[in-house]
Amino acid sequence: MAESKRPRPSQGRGGAGKGPQKRTGRPGAPERRGGRGGAPAGGQRSGPPRGRRPEPKERTDAQKTYDGPPIPDDVSAKDLDRFARQELQGLPPKLAEKVARHLVMAGSLLHEDPALAHQHALAARARAMRNGLVREATGETAYALGNWSEALSEFRAARRITGRLIYAAMMADCERALKRPEKALEYDTPDIRAHLDEAGNAELTIVMAGARRDMGQLEAALQLLETENLLSKNRADWVARLRYAYADTLLAAGRRDEAVTWFHRVVAVDGNKLTDAEERLAELEG
């Protein structure tokens, strides 16, 4: 029987699929082909014509995110508050400065243009994904955009990194927005309450009352709100939001006259016009 022809195995190491190469006088040097200097025979050149630069490749989505939106020259890392700058000290100085400037932009644009603010936060995250402050900022901007799942994911990442619970109310509110009021109620624990200041506790109560309302438990919602200092003389934003939640829940419970009284009390402390209490009163009293 005639022997079948097989390709010969390559000889030596590093020559997969190739036969022995011609020696050139230098050990390991590849064989030169064509004209002088290794140019192809016939004088033809490979590559783009001389004098013409190759077209720049378009940036990928990930690269565009990393680049982020432009930052005005007058925006400085020093515009970030001292606590926040301390949170970035673990980063190399030049990187920390770039991240800080993106965070300044994210904070300044949060209410005016949350979509652009989120792009700045994502650019910061692309550079410092394991920084808790950066993940908190990304969660805040996603929350402002109504990207509830993304915001919740970012807040969870921030909590794993820092151990802080200051965003518990926003996390619970994301669960509400995702139609999971029972999950929202899981944030109302003594441990979380103990880590929150007066404003944080009031904000968490507002969300818990909202979750109770989502479940049709209006009386339970009212009872929760009544545990807070509704008559506080503080004029901070949380007071207006707390009173508004109480007035709105009273109205939902059919207690119209009491609701009108509390909408007036909202207007009395809502100097920043955070709520539409004035419009609600116009509807109720008009």
Image: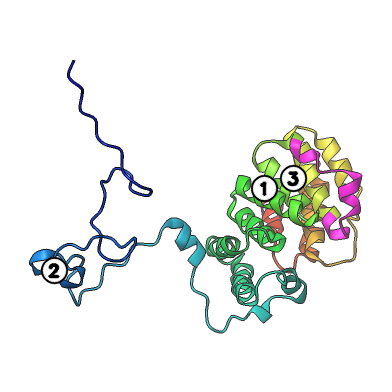
Q: Residues within 10 Å of mark 2 (few under 14, many from 20)?
A: few
**Lower sequence index among marks 2 and 1:** 2
**Residue 242 is drawn in which quadrant?**
bottom right
Residue drawn 77% across the image and 50% down it: 169
**Residue 102 is drawn in which quadrant?**
bottom right
Does the magenta run of residues contain 90? no
Mark in the foreground, 2 or 3:
2
- Secondary structure of the residue carrying tag 1 is helix
Residue 127 lies, with reference to residue 247, above or below; the image says below
| Residue labelled with disc 2 | 35
Q: Nearer the viewer, residue 74 or 239?
A: 74
Residue 178 lies, with reference to residue 48, above or below; the image says above
Residue 27 spot, x, y in % from top left: 34, 62
Tag shown at residue 244: none
Q: Measure the C-alpha gap from mark 2 to mark 3.
A: 73 Å
- Secondary structure of the residue carrying tag 2 is loop
Magenta span covers which residues? Answer: 183-200
Q: Residues within 10 Å of mark 3 (few under 14, many from 20)?
A: many
Q: Residue furthest bottom?
A: 74
Residue 235 lies, with reference to residue 97, above or below; the image says above
Q: Is residue 5 left or right of residue 76?
A: left
Does the magenta run of residues contain 187? yes
Tag shown at residue 172: 3
User: What's under tag 3, amino acid-wise?
Assistant: Ala
| Residue labelled with disc 1 | 152
**Lower sequence index among marks 2 and 3:** 2
